[in-house]
Image: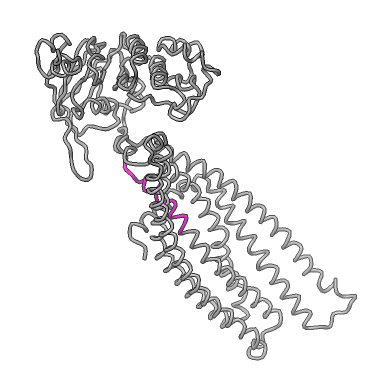
């Protein structure tokens, strides 16, 4: 039997699918009605009229010149039934396509919005490739469920209703026996479906893990090749692949067992109809036309029930495929805007960290980063954050950007609590340049203009010039229209960083955050980037996170952090004279101890 969590996930999946379906309810109702009309006319209307014709023929006494007079109404009825049946069939196709197209758009938007608005903590704990795979499966699962409802299951319901309606007046005992067997069939199928549901979720989870392993290896292919670890990565992939095979095999055997059991019930049903058809006339005086109806309808309904096995298997697979993204959609947002959040308006750029408390949890263990932390940064001041790894420098900048939320205290910009402001308005006031430039697989012009999409070509070129990037861009065969490759792989580290600085130039934000922006560069690239950063910092409140102390020596102020606390605060000269932690770090980096 499926686990409680599996049933809950199925309900949640249906909840999200219903949200989308409800937006296109008219199309969905049209699909249901056209499917019922198609089934009623072609599968049941035709045999019903044919049974009337057979009874007429059996009665005899129709001369050659009376054929059209006697059978004309039946012929016309058959033509009309098939005409409208085909019209319903095409209407079914149209509504199905339209609903799938519209729902796919809505589901894709739903998934994108959920992923885009999740916190960095959420994304740090997941494979990007797995999230993409789960989104695709979630969308495809809706289409699969819709098609499964329309084809195996709706015809099953229609066949039961129409069979009972048309046969009960003629052979009530037969219908009672038939329906009893079909109820047993349905109960067995459902119970085995519940049992297989958890196996499908496990198979989908294994498939997602396989996608994640593949994505991780491909994303870091340079590290794989330069380390000669192709065999190792293949081993990890093979392990995940074997897990997929094992899970799929369990699901296969469970599905086969269900198929064999339901096939036995179908055999019993056809045996009963054979007996009734053979002795129906002798025992109950059943007419030839009624015998035709009994066989045709029973064969139809049994055949439809045979498809239940396949339909439930598709249901299982669809819910299993959708379960990963359903769990993601259910995931609470760790960072979310308050209902009455306002737009952040920055006129000066003063920043205050007041009584800040922040800790993060990993594996149920809480790690305190800041405890009653306070820091005031006046408007326009350029401040450096230094300290050993793990001191909390980068964490502080991420809290400023609300990539994570603090537990206690407040962070204010120009006296406005950022927690009460919308995240987008906050981040549009802060230009962020990280250690590794964040570039898209798009043109250089698009990457520079990402912070300001309506920028003119002249403004983009000027930003590139200010960032010392114009010279190398113009030397490229396609200039600003050059595709940078995934994450900017076609460009050097210095070139990527200057593109990122040009983007920050164009954004023209009052606050600037530089997080190890030069630490991964060679000396020549660092000089170009440093010159660009000097221009970028002018007139802006700037926070510079750096391990290379030469980067912060010329700033207005240097704050030294240690285990989330401020241990020193002053200018470079003042801290050197104080001969404390900063002076010790400076001497190590400049080689003063060797003199």
Does any portion of residue 326 appear in the rendered image? Answer: no
Of 201 and 585, nearer the camera is 585
Q: Which residues are magenta?
A: 316-332
Q: Can the viewer see residue 457? A: yes
Q: Quadrant of residue 437?
A: top left
Q: Magenta part mainly helix, strand or loop?
A: helix
Q: Residue at x 52, y 53 (%)?
A: 144
Q: Quadrant of the N terminus?
A: bottom left
Q: Is residue 397 left or right of residue 500?
A: left
Rendered image quadrant of residue 537:
top left
Q: Say whether residue 488 is left or right of residue 547.
A: right
Q: Position of residue 13 (x, y in %)?
A: 42, 51
Above/below status of 313 relative to 160: above
459 or 42: which is nearer to us?
459
Where in the figure is residue 584, as x and y percent of width and height? 13, 18
Residue 10: x and y in percent read 40, 55
The way the protein has been coloured in the rendering is one colour
Residue 317 lies in the magenta stretch: yes
Q: Residue 510, percent across and down?
A: 32, 14
For the C terminus, the quadrant is top left
Question: Disc count in the image?
Answer: 0
Q: Nearer the viewer, residue 302 or 198?
A: 198
Residue shown at the point (67%, 79%) measured from the top left: 290
- Is residue 67 part of the magenta span, yes or no? no
Residue shown at the point (41%, 10%) measured from the top left: 466
Which residue extends farthest bottom? 282
């Amino acid at each position: 039997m499926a686990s409680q969590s599996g049933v809950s996930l199925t309900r949640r999946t249906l909840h999200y699918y219903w949200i989308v379906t409800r937006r296109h309810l008219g199309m969905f109702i049209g699909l249901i009605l056209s499917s019922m009309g198609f089934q009623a006319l072609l599968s049941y209307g035709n045999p019903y009229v044919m049974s009337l014709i057979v009874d007429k023929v059996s009665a005899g006494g129709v001369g050659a010149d009376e054929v059209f007079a006697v059978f004309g109404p039946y012929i016309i009825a058959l033509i009309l039934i098939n005409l409208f049946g085909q019209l319903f069939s095409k209407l079914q196709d149209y509504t199905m396509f339209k609903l799938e197209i519209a729902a796919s758009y809505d589901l894709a938007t739903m998934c994108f919005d959920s992923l885009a608005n999740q916190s960095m903590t959420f994304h740090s704990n997941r494979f990007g490739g797995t999230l993409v795979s789960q989104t695709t499966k979630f969308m495809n699962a809706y289409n699969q469920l819709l098609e499964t409802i329309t084809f195996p299951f709706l015809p099953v319901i229609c066949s039961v209703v129409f069979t009972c309606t048309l046969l009960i007046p003629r052979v009530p005992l037969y219908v009672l026996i038939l329906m009893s067997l079909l109820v047993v069939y349905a109960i067995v199928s459902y119970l085995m479906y519940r049992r297989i549901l958890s196996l499908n979720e496990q198979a989908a989870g294994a498939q997602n893990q396989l996608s994640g392993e593949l994505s991780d290896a491909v994303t870091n292919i340079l590290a794989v090749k330069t380390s000669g670890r192709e065999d190792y990565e293949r081993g990890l992939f093979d392990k995940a692949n074997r897990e997929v095979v094992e899970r799929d095999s369990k699901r296969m055997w469970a599905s086969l067992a269900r198929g064999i059991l339901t096939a036995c019930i179908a055999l019993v049903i056809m045996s009963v109809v054979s007996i009734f058809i053979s002795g129906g006339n002798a025992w109950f005086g059943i007419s030839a036309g009624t015998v035709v109806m009994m066989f045709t309808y029973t064969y139809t309904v049994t055949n439809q029930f045979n498809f239940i096995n396949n339909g439930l298997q598709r249901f299982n697979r669809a819910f299993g495929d959708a379960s990963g993204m359903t769990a993601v959609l259910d995931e609470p947002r760790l960072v979310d805007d308050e209902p009455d959040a306002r737009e952040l308006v920055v006129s000066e750029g003063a920043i205050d960290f007041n009584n800040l408390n922040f800790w993060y949890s990993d594996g149920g263990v809480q790690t305190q980063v800041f405890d009653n932390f306070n820091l005031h940064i006046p408007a326009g001041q350029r401040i450096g954050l230094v300290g050993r790894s793990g001191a909390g420098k980068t964490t502080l900048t991420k809290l400023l950007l609300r990539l994570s939320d603090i537990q206690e205290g407040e962070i204010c910009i120009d006296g406005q609590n950022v927690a009460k402001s919308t995240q987008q308005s906050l981040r549009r006031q802060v230009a962020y340049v990280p250690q590794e430039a964040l570039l898209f697989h798009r043109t250089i012009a698009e990457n520079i203009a990402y912070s300001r999409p309506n920028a003119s070509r002249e403004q983009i070129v000027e930003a590139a010039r200010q960032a010392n990037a114009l010279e190398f861009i113009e030397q490229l065969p396609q200039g600003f229209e050059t595709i940078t490759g995934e994450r900017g792989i076609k460009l050097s580290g210095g070139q990527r960083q200057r593109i990122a600085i040009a983007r920050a130039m164009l954004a023209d934000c009052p606050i600037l955050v530089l997080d190890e922006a030069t630490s991964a560069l060679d000396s020549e690239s660092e000089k170009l980037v440093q010159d660009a950063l000097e221009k970028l910092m002018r007139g802006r409140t700037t926070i510079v996170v750096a391990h290379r102390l030469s980067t912060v020596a010329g700033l207005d102020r240097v704050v030294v952090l240690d285990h989330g606390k401020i241990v020193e605060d002053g200018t470079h000269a003042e801290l050197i004279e104080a001969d404390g932690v900063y002076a010790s770090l400076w001497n190590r980096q400049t080689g003063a101890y060797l003199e």
